[in-house]
Each structure stands twice: as C-alpha cells, then as structure tokens.
C-alpha cells in the first residue's frame, strides 16, 4: 500500500475511534475501578472487574426519602465512567451495579451513580437509582445551559409490553439532582389496540434563570407498526398521533426544578387500564 494512502487510512481510523468528551465518553484520570474503591472503602477485588463490600453501605435516592442499604458481602460489577459538564466545570460520573446477595432473580439489586471532579478520586456524591429490572445511563448527554443533563432509564419487558421510567438529572452544587421522571408504555402485537409512546426532552431558554426550562414531551402513536400490521384488519380511519407534555422551571427559593405546567397526567390516565 502506498505510504500516502496508508497515512490517510490511519488518520480516518483514528478520527472514527477517538473519544468525544462532550458525549459522555471516558477521558483521562483515575479508571473506573480506582474510583469505585474510593466510593466503597475497604472493598476487595473478588474477581477481575468485580468488587465485594467489606461493610454495609447506606445510599440516598435523589428526590425521595427512602434509602438503599447494601449489605456487607454485596458484589459490585459493571463499572462505567463518563465525563459530564456542569456550569462550565468538568466532572466524572461512575455508574455501577450491585448484585442482591439474597436472590438469584436477574435485575435485582441496586444501580449506583457517583460524582467526582475531573482528575480527582474523592467522591462528591453517591446515589442509588434502580427502580426496575434493567437500569442504564443513557448516552449521549444533552446540552443543558452551561453544562449537560443526562437520563437514567429503568425498564422491563414482558411478552408484548414495554415499560420505562426515564429520570432526567443534572449536577447542581456538586450534587446529583433529579429534575423529572417520565413513565412510558408500549403495547405490540394487538393490531389496533397496539400503541407506542416516545419521549423527547427539550430545554427552551429561560431568561434570567441559571438554567433553561425543561420540557418533557411524549408522543402517543396508536396502531401496529409495519411489522406487526401483517394480518391485521385495516382501520377505517388512522388515529393521528397525540402529544402530551410537562414543563419545569428552576425555582430559586426552593433551589430545585418545579412543575409549572402538567399535561402528562392525561397520558397516565390513558395507560392506567392498559397494563
């Protein structure tokens, strides 16, 4: 291969694989396991990439009064670090899973998120976020004022239904703060009784506020998708998509986001008898 062509190929390959900090990908600094050992002092490496707690750990849950207790001996896995911005400053998030030592049921246990200043290993905040079988830190992160907002999704599925809680978070005063949680449901394989709900977050400007407004918008589409429509009777009239939304604004006095316009309650009413 000619040297010039080889150089071009290598340059393109590097561009395609280089990490992008703005999307929440890992950059320089302590690795995920090192950060986890700072969160859970005294934990020992039980296997490659697996830690076992030496003592009980109590974790807060953002936005609720309840606490999660991890017992001594709990195994920690699935360490995943990501860069995040807040008010122009760089931070690192560490996502971790904890196995429930008392059950073999998949999805039981806990899902934690820890916050660090970029380049440092002392945790600023640690929270537990699991509410359903599968928990994940969604990518990419979203531009949010002078920083980023991010979503933690909790979900599970049965034969023809999908359930998801999407919780939107940001960093405020070096703490992980929940803004809002939106539940969506999907039903497939039931012809005209099928439907899907898709969630979109947007952040309109809010002059004079340190943060933008937050708009959670869900579109409800009734009827089967293309694959499920085979064998279904054609409807006399297609139902147009319906949109529901909630709006949040920053409340300086309360030092948090508050709901100022609610429309998702109507969607909750639609979902109530569909389980």
Image (cartoon, rainbow, N blue to C red):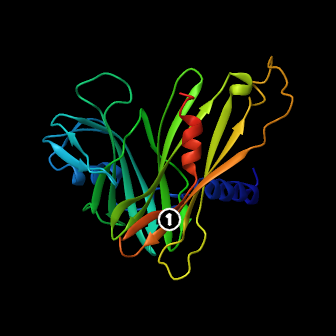
Can you give x and y, in whole percent of width and height, for residue 20 in the image?
55, 60
Relative to the observer, which residue lies in front, 50 or 9?
Answer: 50
Relative vertical location of residue 237 with respect to residue 148 in this rendering, above or below: above
Relative to the observer, which residue lies in front, 24 or 104?
Answer: 104
Residue drawn at the location 76% of the way across and 26% of the way down: 227
Relative to the observer, which residue lies in front, 129 or 233?
Answer: 233
- What residue does disc 1 label? 148
Relative vertical location of residue 232 with respect to residue 27 in this rendering, above or below: above
- Answer left or right for 251 relative to 37: right
Residue drawn at the location 23% of the way across and 25% of the way down: 102
Q: Quadrant of residue 197?
A: top right
Can you give x and y, in whole percent of width and height, for residue 23 in the image?
54, 59
Relative vertical location of residue 155 with respect to residue 210 in this rendering, above or below: above
Can you give x and y, in whole percent of width and height, for residue 271 in the image?
57, 35
Residue drawn at the location 67% of the way across and 33% of the way down: 195
Neighbourhood count class around disc 1 (C-alpha, 10 Å): few under 14, some 14–19, many 20 upward? many
- Answer left or right for 64 relative to 208: left
């Amino acid at each position: 291969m000619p040297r010039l062509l080889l150089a071009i190929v290598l340059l393109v390959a590097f561009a395609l694989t280089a990490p992008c900090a703005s999307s929440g990908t890992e950059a320089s600094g302590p690795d995920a396991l090192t950060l986890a050992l700072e969160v859970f002092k005294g934990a020992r490496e039980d296997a490659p990439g697996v830690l076992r707690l030496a003592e009980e750990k109590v974790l807060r849950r953002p936005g609720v009064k309840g606490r999660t207790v991890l017992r001594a001996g709990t195994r920690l896995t699935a360490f995943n670090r990501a860069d995040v911005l807040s008010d122009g400053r760089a931070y690192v998030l560490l996502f971790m899973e904890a196995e429930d030592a008392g059950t073999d049921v998949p999805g039981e246990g806990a899902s934690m998120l820890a916050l660090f200043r970029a380049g440092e290993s002392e945790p600023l905040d640690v929270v537990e976020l699991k509410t359903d079988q599968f928990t994940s830190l969604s990518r990419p992160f979203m531009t949010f004022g002078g920083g980023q907002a991010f979503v933690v999704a909790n979900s599970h599925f049965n034969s023809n239904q999908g359930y998801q809680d999407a919780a939107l978070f940001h960093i405020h005063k070096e703490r992980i703060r929940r803004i809002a949680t939106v539940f969506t449901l999907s039903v497939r394989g039931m012809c005209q009784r099928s439907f899907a709900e898709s969630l979109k977050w947007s952040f309109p400007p809010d002059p004079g506020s340190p943060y933008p407004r937050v708009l959670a918008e869900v579109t409800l589409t009734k009827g089967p998708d293309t694959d499920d429509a085979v064998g279904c009777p054609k409807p006399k009239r297609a139902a147009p998509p319906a949109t529901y939304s909630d709006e949040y604004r920053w409340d300086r006095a309360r030092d948090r986001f508050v709901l100022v316009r609610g429309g998702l309650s109507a969607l909750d009413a639609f979902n109530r008898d569909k389980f």
